[in-house]
Image: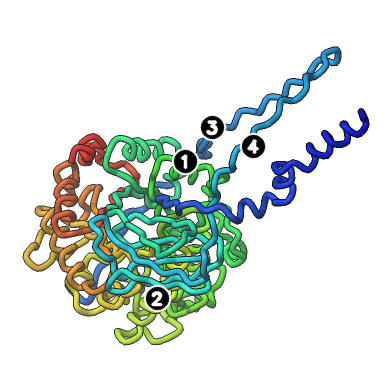
Amino acid sequence: MLLFTIAIVTGYGVLSPATSRAKSVPPSAMVASAVVAASVESTTAPAALPAQPRDPEVVKPGDAPAAAARPTPPTPDPVQPRPEARPSAPEPQVVKPEPLPEFPWPSPTVTGRVLDTERKPLAGASVVVRGVEVRTDAEGAFKLERVPPEASLTVKMPGFEKVRLAPMRGTVEAVLRPQAIKAAYLTYYGVGDRKIRGRVLDLATRTELNAVVIDVKGDRGWILYKTEIPQAVAAGAKGPATLRDFDALMADFKSRGIYTIARIVTFKDNILATARPDLAVIDTRTGKPWIDNEKLAWVDPFREEVWAYNIAIAQEAIRRGFDEIQFDYVRFPTDGKLGAAKYARPNSKDTRLPAIAGFLAKARRELGASGAFVAADLFGYTAFNENDTDIGQRIEELALHLDYICPMVYPSGYHKGIPGFANPVLVPGKVVHESVRLIRKRAGGTVAQVRPWLQDFRDYAFDRRIFGVLEVQAQIRGTEEAGGSGWMLWNPRNDYTGSALRGKGALAGR
C-alpha cells in the first residue's frame, strides 16, 4: 500500500495540468503568439561672380574627445554560500506571464498615412524600410510591399522630426511633429578640440541651438574619422586630426538630443585630385591638376566616379550616426585661372547644371533610402539669378533632389549687392528675408525646405564691421519671417554670439 501511494503522488506531480502545459509549449511559441502595440520613437546678380568664400579654417590640433558615456560599473560576483552552511530548499516559483513582445507585420504589404500634429495629411513624406523608400500621395497615404516581418519603418519629412515605427497590425498612422533645426558649425579641427566643442555644447544646453554641422570631409579632402572606404584609404584621406574615438563623440551628441549634420565638401578635394589626376580638373598650361586661389585642387564634377566617391563617404557617415548629409562645394569653381581649367566634357551653361543636378539626384536616391535627409549648400546669388550662376546651381532643378536647400545668405557674400540693397551689411535682416523668400518661392511644389547659413563673423567686403547680437538676431528674424525652416551659424573659428540666441526657458514659455 505504501508503494502504491508513493506511485500515485509521484504521477500526479509529473502529469499535473500546469506541468503538462509548461512542457508542451516551447518559449518561442509563447513569444510568437503575443501581441503588443507598436512603439513610436523619435530618431531623433552678375554672370561673372567672385567667390562667395568660406573663411579659412582655424588650423588647431584637436584633442581626443572626452568619453561620451560613463563606464558601467562592474557587476559584483554573486555571493556564494559558506561551505559549512547548507543551502535552504528552493521556494516554489510563481510563474508570471511574460511581457507581450512586439509582433511581426501580419502581411508583407504595409499601408498607412502620414499626418502632422493637426492631423492634416503630409504629401511627399518618405517612408523607408531597409533600403526602400516610397513617398506619400496627396492624402498622406503610402503603400509598401515585401516588407520583412520584423522590420521597422522610418518616416521622415523635411521640417519635421523623424519617427521610427515598430511592426503593428492594421493601417499605420504616423504623426510627425514640426522641427526647426538651429545649428552651429564645427570645423574639421574644431570638433576635436575640447574647448571649442565645449563652447558649442554649452550653447546647445542653454539656448535654442539644437544641432551641429560637422566637417566629415572638409575643404582639403581629409575625413574626420578612420574611414573604411578603400578609395579614401588609397588616396590618403586620413588627415592630421582624425578622431580616434568618434563613436563616443557621436554618442555624446545623441545623449544631449543634438541633431547631427555631416558636411561633405564635394568637388573641391585636394586629396583625391592629387592622388587621382585622372579624376581632377586639369590645368591646360601644365597638364597637372588645376588649383584655385587657395592653391587647392578640384575634382571633375562630370566624373561619375567622383560622384560615387562622395556618396560612399556620405553612406559611411550615415552608418556612423549622422541624421543628415550636407554637400558643400557642390558646384564648379569660381576663382583661379578658370580659362585654364579642362574638364571631361565641355564646360558650358548646357552641361554644368545637368552635372550638378545629376549628382544630387543620384545622391538623394541612394541616401534618402538610408533614412537620412539630404541637403546642399548653394550660393546666395542663386536666389536672384535666373541662370545657373555659371557654377551649375539653379534653384528649380536642384530643389527636386533635396530635403533642405542651404543658401549662404551672408550679407558680406553679396559683393555687388542685390536688387534694392547696394550695401547688404547695412540691412542684414532684410537681405536674408528676401533671399529666403525668393528661394522658397522658386522651390515651390517640392518638399524641400530652406534653411540658410547666417553670418556670425566680421564683414570682409564692405566696411569690416563686426556682426554682433543685433546683426545675428536680425538675420534670424529675417529667416523666420520669410518661412525658413531653421538656420545655421557660420564662424570659421567656431566662436558664436551666444547672447543673440533665445534661452531654453524662453522657448519653453512660447
Residue linked to disc 3: 70
Of circles 4 and 3, the one toward us is 4
Circle on res. 95: 4
Q: Earlier in the sequence, mark 4 or mark 2?
A: 4
* Cα gap from disc 3 to disc 1, whole angstroms: 10 Å
Residue 89 picture location, percent across and down? 78, 22
Asked whether, in this view, residue 343 is left or right of residue 242, the answer is: left
Residue 161 picture location, percent across and down? 34, 54
- At label 2, counting other C-alpha atoms closer than 10 Å, the crowd grade (few under 14, some 14-19, many 20 or more) is some
- At label 3, counting other C-alpha atoms closer than 10 Å, the crowd grade (few under 14, some 14-19, many 20 or more) is few
Query: Residue 376 sits in which quadrant?
Result: bottom left
Residue linked to disc 2: 361
Residue beneath the point at 88% across and 31% down = 6
Q: Earlier in the sequence, mark 3 or mark 2?
A: 3
**Do callouts 2 and 1 mark residues in contact (Cβ within 8 Å)?**
no
- At label 1, counting other C-alpha atoms closer than 10 Å, the crowd grade (few under 14, some 14-19, many 20 or more) is some
Asked whether, in this view, residue 479 is left or right of residue 494, the answer is: left
* Label 3 element class: loop
Question: What amino acid is labelled 4 in the image?
Answer: Val
- At label 4, counting other C-alpha atoms closer than 10 Å, the crowd grade (few under 14, some 14-19, many 20 or more) is few
Residue beneath the point at 35% across and 85% down = 351
Query: Residue 409 sits in which quadrant?
Result: bottom left
Asked whether, in this view, residue 242 is left or right of residue 93, the answer is: left
* Cα gap from disc 4 to disc 3, whole angstroms: 36 Å
* Cα gap from disc 2 to disc 1, whole angstroms: 32 Å
